[in-house]
Image: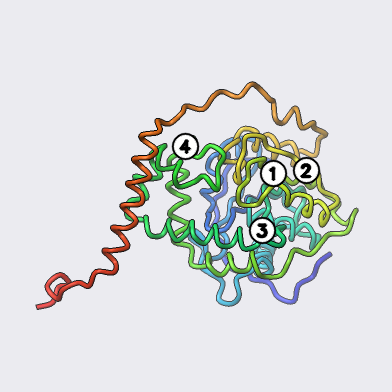
Amino acid sequence: MFTFPYCYFMNLHFVRRGTGRPLLLVHGIGGSWRSWNTILDALAAERDVIAVDLPGHGETPKLAGENSIATLADAVTGFLTQHELLGIDAVGSSMGARLVLELARRGGVLGAVVSLDPGGFWQGWQIPFFYHSVAVSVKHVKALQPVMPALAGSAVGRTLLLPQFSARPWAVDAQQAIDEMHTFAHSPAFDELLDQLAHGQVQQPAPKSSIPGPLVIGWGRQDRVCLPSQSKLALAKFPDARLYWFEHCGHFPQWDQPAEAARLILAVTSRQPFTDAAIAQAKPAKAAPALPKAAVVGAALALVAGGLWLLSSRRTPRSPRDAGGR
């Protein structure tokens, strides 16, 4: 069992819904407990779901010291210890997926684990690709906050905002997109954690047969944040894991394939045998409604124009009268 020199017994904000076997949900960088809204009700119908806000996210304050995978893992362990939840089944997404893998590696913290598109298994050119692409996306999100509800609330706006994160960004739930874009822009720990994910300590491996509970890594075939090829290194470092592929899916299976993601989570945490086909329940995919090209082009021009306007308005000096001076 992993023992650590100190533990953050901080009050993580969380929501708790449902009854049954406890299930912990751990969101990704820039997210919050609301990142799970698309599947929360489905899981709570069969599980006692506990969805946390990690330090520096949602309603949980940032850690006073270093914010890294190691310190976040300590904070989650402290929370579980405080609430007598050690051994709980857990699901993580993106950075949260990396966190639950780290906690599984430590031993004695989690039970069954589902890791959805974990970050941290990039190598070589993939490291700057991840870091700079996400950093640029977040800068745009921050600059566009004044008009973000309108942008994220429209199918065309989501198509322009979320192509890195979703295989079908126009189909992402509008309120989900609005919530996520807000927390992306307002997480005080985002920049530090992004740097830690890209340039910090690499994920340590877990030797074969060292993780006794069920462990499944799920990956979207169209993930443009954590590229599908990175699954090879994830499996090499966690040889006890089973890999599950989400078809027609980007970085967040709970966005692009919510029903399938819920089935996988419930199957793994039930500890009963299952087949990939039973989880996928593959059917001929319905053609997604095509967005008019003119509308996409028009929205793109509006997005660029809005960004330029915001930038120029920030740089234009204000007169004493405009600033309230007399």
Mark before the other along the chain sequence, 4 or 3: 3
Q: Nearer the viewer, mark 2 or mark 4?
A: 4
Please tell me the numbered disc located at residue 243: 2
Q: Residue furthest left?
A: 326
Label 3, on which residue?
126
C-alpha distance separating marks 1 and 4 = 20 Å
Label 1, on which residue?
219
Measuring from the top left, give residue 219's x and y in whole percent: 69, 44
What's the coloring here? rainbow
Residue 276, above or below 40: above
Measuring from the top left, give residue 254's x and y in whole percent: 59, 41
The residue under the point 28% across, 58% down is: 309
Q: Is residue 80 left or right of residue 178?
A: right
Q: Are marks 1 and 2 in contact (CB under 8 Å)?
A: yes
Mark before the other along the chain sequence, 1 or 2: 1
Give the residue type at disc 3: Gln
Give the residue type at disc 2: Leu
Mark before the other along the chain sequence, 1 or 4: 4
Give the residue type at disc 4: Trp
Label 3 neighbour load within 10 Å: few <14, some 14-19, many 20+: some
Q: Residue furthest right?
A: 209
Please tell me the numbered disc located at residue 93: none
Mark before the other along the chain sequence, 1 or 3: 3
C-alpha distance separating marks 1 and 3 = 17 Å
Q: Are marks 1 and 4 in contact (CB under 8 Å)?
A: no
Label 4, on which residue?
170
Mark before the other along the chain sequence, 2 or 3: 3
Give the residue type at disc 1: Trp
Measuring from the top left, give residue 26's x and y in whole percent: 62, 53
